[in-house]
Amino acid sequence: MKIIICGAGQVGWQIARHLSGERNDVTVVDSNPDLVRMATESLDVQGIAGFASYPDVLERAGARDAEMIIAATHSDEVNMVTCQVAHSVFGINRKIARLRSQSYLDAIYSDLYRRDHMPIDVVISPEKEVAAAALQRLSAPASFDTEVFMEGKAHLLGITIEDECPVVNTPLRQLTDLFSTLRATVVGVRREGTLFAPESKDQLFVGDDCYVFSHRDDIARTMEIFGKKVSKQERVVLVGGGNVGLTVAKHLESDIRRIRTKVIEKNRRCAERAAEALERTIVLNGDGLDAALLAEAGIARADAMLAVTDDDKTNMLACVRAKAEGCDYVIALINDPTLVPLMTPLGIDAYINPRATTVSSILRHIRHGRVRAVYSIGDAEAEVIEAEVLSTSPIAGRTVGEIDFPEGALIGMVRKGDKVIRPLGNTRIDEGDVIAVFALAEDVPQVEQLLQVSIDFF
């Protein structure tokens, strides 16, 4: 597939890394020649230095032959105009744009994005994606990562194995015997910095970070088996009242559990805007690192604290201070993935990577076959792909044990009709089933081949 990626920043580079590794013909466009050079030197892509919205620049990038364009520059307006030019001048069929401004994302203006108006097929909002990720982290406390699949019936949980975990040093095959009714599957383990798909003979050791698929109704039991206590989230403190913090606070206000929320925002204008938009939430104007202000917000009694400012170091320090003041569960928004290894030593329970959430959203609209969702794990180390099995798929009609999956791939959950089950070796995968597959980055192309429809399907 010929794909043009406009913007060679963190998101654009990561998308280019994914797609070029899967033998797509990728061209990266950016106004910064240094970013273009970095992309072409480190990835198997072509590079064009210039403004993505200029027709002559897109022409040089091969727009006349392109099947898809992804506009992920730092400017909403450039992304929008790029999609318009790609449609009107070059007739590119698939157009994806990243838009940040809330005004462009307001639901009452959604009619703007039509082929006869602003022809953008998919609009990605990083702020909305990050807010959704924050809410998911809150829904599964004691996990460092979480994502929802199969219309909410299956959850991917990131769990750190600690001393009190009852299943430490237990082969995974024995977990099936010990907990025969538990609908949960360990699909990935990170040990000493290396992520791998475990085999049935592998054991879990203290310090491992493992990724577990669990049925929605078995989450509490799964967390208990892995040595985690699940507590109710009744009091939440948010540090940061910008677009992300405001979106999270609005969702918490509408939650049927009536969660009591307080927001701390340093910028007075942002604080006033948040106070006007929220009805039951208390907004405090001040520094989230101020111990006195945190005490006023009731941090010692809070069940969770989310630090979602636009500064990584502020978020990390706010989490460390909140933990020191007695908050049980803290979540930090981290843009720089090189800071992630510091999370555990600093005692930060979970983090949100905006780049990973945005990349996952974009990949969801690129994958082949009947892909319903894609989630990027870590620094693009692996993906979880949810897809419908078609009659022409090589895996249709075969049992899990018969499918020739690569070593770095495991099926986490299978949905048959309205029923979500844990896959066993004798589980038959039929046409119409939906499966969730964990795959290391290098094995994603092979997994896609197993999910992809054959040419005669069309």
Image (spheres, rainbow, N blue to C red):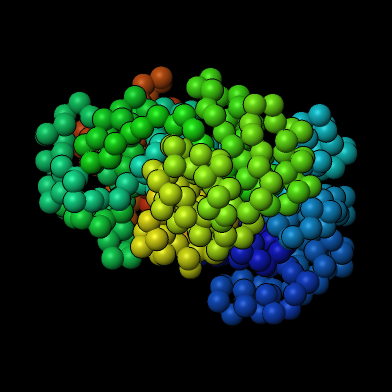
Taking the spot 64% from the left edge, 26% from the top edge, the residue there is: 280
Give the camera-side residue of 91 and 379: 379
Give the camera-side residue of 422 and 69: 422
> Residue 297 appears in which quarter of the rendering?
top right
Please state the horizontal and vertical placement of residue 87, each as a whole percent of the image.
82, 49
Please state the horizontal and vertical placement of residue 61, each as a whole percent of the image.
75, 67
Taking the spot 16% from the left edge, 31% from the top edge, the residue there is: 179
Q: Judge from the rendering whether residue 381 lies leftward or rightward of residue 189; answer left or right.
A: right
Give the camera-side residue of 18 and 98: 98
Residue 271 visible somewhere in the drawing: yes
Q: Is residue 129 above or below residue 62?
A: above
Q: Is residue 106 above or below residue 331?
A: above
In this rendering, the count of numbered labels is 0
If the image is split into quadrants, where does the N terminus sit? bottom right
Taking the spot 79% from the left edge, 58% from the top edge, the residue there is: 75
Please state the horizontal and vertical placement of residue 27, each as a whole percent of the image.
68, 67
Please state the horizontal and vertical placement of residue 175, each as a whole percent of the image.
15, 39
> Residue 11 appears in which quarter of the rendering?
bottom right
Residue 368 visible somewhere in the drawing: no
